[in-house]
Amino acid sequence: MRSIMLAVLICAALLGLAACGSKEKVLYVFNWSDYIDPALVKQFEQQHNCKVKIPTYDSNESMFAKIESTRESFDIAVPSGDHVTLLAQKGYLEPLDLKKLSHWGNLDPKLLEKARSFDPGNQYAVPYFWGVTGLLYNKKNVPAEVLKSGSWSMLADKYFNGKQKVSMLEDAREVVGAALISKGFGVNDTSEQALAAAAQVLKAWDQNITQYDSEAYKNEVADGTTWLAQAYNGDALQQMELNKDLGFILPVEGSSLWMDSMVILKSSQNKELAYAFIDFLLEAENARANADYVMYATPNAEAGKLLDPAFTGNTLIYPPAEYVDKCYMIEFLGDKVKAINDLFEKIRMN
Ligand code: N2P
């Protein structure tokens, strides 16, 4: 009897081990929300017999803070350029082994060159999407009269006074950047004169701003809770697909420009799977499907060839060169970023 029980126990232990051995791997991709086509994720999981978990964040700052405190929780992250530099300087990133990225050659060499401004030698970052920031509005709530200037200054329009219907992003670089641009400065200008001008503009806008938020506004502009919102272009376009009353403006003064990249964290325990995932997203057809879903401009030249001409011809996704000339790439500022963050906190908290 005893020996039977022992045999049963041994069997159970062995079965447990076998189950453990075949346990599917989990890849953790720390990403912005609404920033990947879920159908692609499913496809990858099936191909690789693994699970991909995608915890999300709503700002570079919160992504960075989370990575600082719990680095080992993620394999891949998707920071904007300035934060690629910061993460690299902190020593948190794995240098890329391009031999493991068979579709690297699909990336547009001109955009790889741009990426070298925040990632010298294209050492760590695989460009994912790029974009600009503007104003999303609901035609039902905002009269053409208010929109017609096409200027950032509509954020201060009397029409919105006391109505609690305007929002800006929870993003210091974007909020202060918009104010700087509206006063003719670049988004990376931290001179006293530039920031004093920005502070004045922000005070005027803030009288109409009810929240600095990068998530909730997406549904709120659609349902009329918010009438006008600063928005990343792709997020705005995703909403416009669902609701024909929404519109998006690239302000006449110009805008910020950014590029987000996939990076592998040095602390990742799953680097092979991380490379496989990035390479999968670099495949031309997958990069096409992903761009089509998120509605941002892809740095993948081969995907660009497969995209519908209506997509690549959409000037809210691919603004014309004359407009891009008026835009400023958000750059890494080192310690100087503190002046921008402080100004944002001051406005937001008052
Ligand atoms: C996706 C927002 C990503 C753009 N929802 C910000 N760089």
Image (tube, helix red, strand yellow):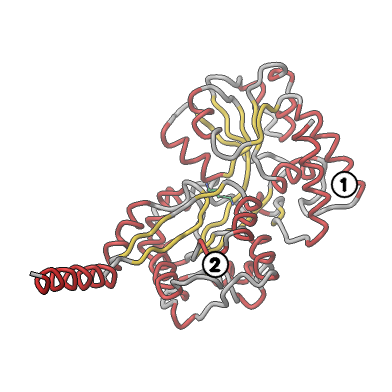
Q: Is residue 204 above or below residue 65?
A: above
Position of 163 with respect to 297 (left or right) is right
**86, 160: nearer the viewer:** 86
Q: Residue, x 52% and y 51% (percent of image)?
A: 32
Identify the residue at horizontal 63%, vertical 40% (top origin). 134
Q: Give the structural element (helix, strand or loop) at label 2.
A: strand
**Residue 333 rendering spot, x and y as whole percentages:** 78, 60
What amino acid is labelled 1 in the image? Ala
Q: Earlier in the sequence, mark 2 or mark 1?
A: 1
Answer above or below: position of 105 versus 176. below
On the picture, is 174 further left or further right than 73?
right
Q: Quadrant of the C terminus?
A: top right
- Displayed quadrant of residue 10: bottom left
Q: Residue at x 83, y 50 (%)?
A: 339
Check if mark 2's residue and mark 1's residue have beta carbons within 8 Å.
no
Q: Amino acid at mark 2?
A: Val
Task: Using a 10 Å C-alpha cutoff, classify the residue at mark 1 as few (fewer than 14 neighbours), some (14 to 19) or many (20 or more).
Answer: some
Residue bearing mark 2:
263
Q: Position of residue 107 (x, y in %)?
A: 50, 70
Question: x and y percent of residue 281 in the render?
Answer: 41, 64
In this rendered view, identify the residue nearer to me: 174 or 8: 8
Q: Which x, y percent locates residue 141? A: 57, 19
Most extreme residue toward the right is 193
Label 1 sits on a secondary structure element that is: helix
The image's mark for residue 194 is 1
